[in-house]
Amino acid sequence: MDFDLSDEQRMWREALHDFVAREVKPRAHEVDEEARFNWEAARKMGPLGLLGLNVPEEYGGAGVDPVSAAIAIEELGWGCGSTALAISAHNGLGCAPIALFGTPDQKGRFLPPAASGQGRLAALALTEPGAGSDLKGVRTRAVRQGEEWVIDGSKAWCTNASIADFIVTLVRTDTAGGSRTLCMVIVPTDIPGVHIGPPEKKMGLKGSPTNAVTYEGVRVPADYLLGPEGGGLPQALVVLDGGRISIGALAVGLAQAAFEAARQYARERQAFGHPIADYQAIQWMLADAATQIHAARLMIYQAAWLKGQGRPFTKEASMAKLFATEMAERVCRDAIQIHGGYGYSREYPVERIYRDARLMTIGEGTSEIQRLVIARQVLAE
């Protein structure tokens, strides 16, 4: 499990595990039942560095290495899928584009409040009603008028939109189309013309709000554009590569929680005069779960390590995301099976964890998209 972690990384894991066990995991059922984001825990995350994983220290963040960031999201996933997804999106999708591509002024304006826990969270809006995996199909338009961009369009499935101070938005600056007309723009959520829809009614992850966002004549300063004009698509792809590591780590955390619950139940539940853990059918499910979780964790850490070394990691991130998320669904399914009828009850955590895990093979690029990315990489080698 340690993957040759440094002493600092082990201490980081232990500190976060204690925090999550105290502030996040005990409220996971309540967060799901009430479809309410856990602001109480989130407010305490700033001083720990959990809200500034990708933010350099000079802008108030933790600036941790990618393996430590993966550890953080895994621990949060172990505690509560909803909370973990919101914090993962805040760090890897909302803050990361500014940390990676922003000017010093942009970083100084937006990152310190986001990392401190004093403000609200950050979000990224890529998906549209007619453009999901195909980002070249984005139609949200930004037109330059003097020293402002005027934005019109709509986005869908935007994680954190209703609890965010700003949304980094992928827009098109020319109706002629083409990837070179795509740009990323920072859009504060409190300016006129930004309309955030009600939370989507989802199968799981109910405490992580997901919303449609409509832009009607939204005016933002020209210097809220990230990087050079036309750089939006490559920027988005870089951000998504890192986000896939995060979603994979979250899936590992969910699987770990389901495995621990199933193991405890198997030790306690009696059938035919013995704990069900004595029976081979149960033992094999637990053995498979432990093996697959271990393999997925190593894949996530390797992809994160490559990122930290500044080496190419697109293929490894997609492989890790694909394996970890599909693994989590299998492990959570078997955890319910070990619980029998009780596993289907909302009174036991494995029911919630299974619903939360289901999104992981969809968000940040579906399993099918990951296979396309991997195939293109291996065929080009």
Image (cartoon, rainbow, N blue to C red):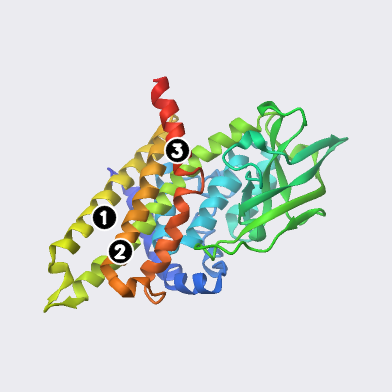
Q: Which residue is drawn at 17% across and 77% down?
A: 270
Determine which of the numbered discs, if any, sits on residue 370 in the image: 3
Which mark is first along the chain, 1 or 3?
1
Q: Which residue is drawn at 44% across and 64% down?
A: 80
Badge 3: residue crowd in 10 Å (few <14, some 14–19, many ≥20): many
Q: Is mark 2 on a helix, strand or loop?
A: helix
The amino acid type of the residue labelled 2 equals Ala
Q: Name the residue under label 1.
A: 289
Query: Is 23 situated left or right of 174 in this image?
Result: left
Determine which of the numbered discs, if any, sits on residue 345 in the image: none
State the image coordinates of residue 14 (x, y, percent, origin top left): 34, 58
Q: Mark 2 points at which residue?
A: 335
State the image coordinates of residue 269 (x, y, percent, origin top left): 21, 76
Q: Residue at x 56, y 40 (%)?
A: 133
Badge 1: residue crowd in 10 Å (few <14, some 14–19, many ≥20): many
100 over 57 or under it: above or below = above
Q: What element carries label 3?
A: helix
The amino acid type of the residue labelled 3 equals Gln
